[in-house]
Amino acid sequence: MSCFQTSASHSWIYPTVILCLFGFFSMMRPSEPFLMLYLSGPDKNLTSEEITNEIFPVWTYSYLVLLFPVFILTDYIRYKPVINLQGISFIITWLLLLFGQGVKTMQVVEFFYGMVTATEVAYYAYIYSVVSPEHYQKVSGYCRSATLVAYTAASVLAQLLVSLANLSYFYLNVISLASVSMAFLFSLFLPMPKKSMFFHAKPSKEAPPKPAGKDAVLEEPQKDHEPGGQEVVTVSGNPYDGHWSSSKPESVALRVFVQWLQDLKECYSSKHLFYWSLWWAFSTAGFNQVLNYVQVLWDYKAPGQSSIIYNGAVEAIATFGGALAAFAVGYVKVNWDLLGELALAIFSVVNAGSLFLMHYTTSIWACYVGYLLFKTGYMLLITIAVFQIAVNLSVERYALVFGINTFIALVIQTVITVIVVDQGGLRLPVHIQFLVYGSYFAVIAGIFLMRSIFIIYSTKCRKTVQSSATSQNPYGPHPEEPKNN
């Protein structure tokens, strides 16, 4: 049996299947849509104020503190141990949820859940270290699909068990504990990578063949042109080629950190990438904040512990709708350089309007509709943003930019939490919080609307100047004659 696993682990199929199984069972958590009702119900007897102002903010703080060191550690120890750690954190989280009591214990739960989310980077980065580059796009799709299918299935199962079987929220958490325990067992069978993207990268002479397509690694920087006429340098290539092989830095860590700083400087010097990353960071901060407190809002709009609550169905529809929207992006033919930021502005307006609807309405159904619009719009735009950022970056630099954007988003979210939610801040009621979040997305929409108007106007002016120059020089070279350069 061990011989079979050893031979199978050298192909891309075996690690992909195991990782997808891990992703599926780690996301198969039917207790998630009813977490607020479980904590405020007879099992835990916590008040809405304790949950909102004292317990949930701990997740934001722990995620922020853990993300950067975990990001570095993940690459240094080559992914698998961090995936194992995520599995252990899952188990501890649900054991404490089931058998712990009191505010302090639930704060510990949020800390370990922060560990879970911080270690997610290992799940999405692992596959790049064990499969060849020609399979990157395929296995990335498999891994993301596994988590989306699992989350949707868990939400549907939760709604059926609550509405039809009248199952206690406690047993939903028991099912979640069994599922994440299965995920941990599958993580033990993952093959240990021999390389990583940064600290254990292969030398250039051993590097695998470079694929064609959006993740292709180019030997030299390439130049794109913004609609405004400014050159945008996008960085590609292996950061360990060339001068790194000839120089001998004092340590591998110093070499990697210096390379990171150089890469970030070059990547963010592209205005196109900078503004898409800016939207990513600010919108992700707001999105995470809404997801963290939307169940509290639902409980405020329709208080009670009955089977007429449809949180699970709403989460399932929102996830499925977001997945369809993300899938549809691949078939939309749009000049994203010209109209991309206008799309960001328009859908940010939709997000702001959805949050205002959730604030002002007294109907739980209207609140559900607002959430569906908000989540679908965000998942559509984040897919476009990911594509726009990744299209001219190698896998190594995409992972770095993704990590930095996520870290900035967490810093912004922490500031919002401290000011708006935390007991040391304003401690705003949850319905007022959503008024703040709606205003927040309205500001984002205004910024990108002005930016998009500037881009479209600059492009129009440049075309006018070019057409004017052509008309004033009617005696230019004949199309069939060679142009004298």
Image: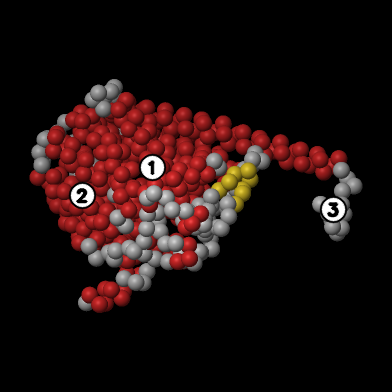
| Amino acid type, callout 2 | Ser
Alpha-carbon span between mark 2 and mark 3: 68 Å
Q: Quadrant of residue 327?
A: bottom left
Q: Residue at x 71, y 36 (%)?
A: 461
x and y percentages locating residue 273 in the rendered image: 52, 43
**Numbered tag placed on residue 51 in the rendering:** none
Mark 3 belongs to which amino acid? Asn
Q: Secondary structure at mark 3?
A: loop
Three-letter code for the amino acid on which mark 1 is drawn: Thr
The residue drawn where x is 9% and y is 45% is 99
Residue 446 in the image, given as x and y percentages of width and height:
51, 30
Say which residue label 1 marks: 406
Label 1 to label 2, Cα distance in Å?
21 Å
Q: For the residues carrying marks 2 and 3, which lies nearer the camera in this image? A: 3
- Decide which of 2, 207 is in the foreground and name it: 207
Place of residue 382 in the rendered image (x, y in percent of width and height, measured from the top left)? 44, 46
Of tags 1 and 3, the one toward the viewer is 3
Residue drawn 18% across the image and 46% down it:
93
Q: Nearer the viewer, residue 278 or 36?
A: 278
User: Which residue bears the numbered disc 3?
Assistant: 484
What is the crowding at mark 1: few (fewer than 14 residues within 10 Å), some, or many (at least 20)?
many
Element at label 1: helix
**Is residue 126 rendered to the left or right of residue 135?**
left
Which residue corresponds to mark 2? 89
Q: Earlier in the sequence, mark 2 or mark 3?
A: 2
The answer to whether any part of residue 411 appears in the image is yes
Could you say which is closer to the camera, residue 38 or residue 306? 38
| Circle 2: element type | helix
Residue farthest right in this picture: 475
Q: Give the residue displayed 88% in from the left and 45% down from the top.
A: 474
Q: Which of the two discs, 1 and 2, labels the residue nearer the N terminus?
A: 2
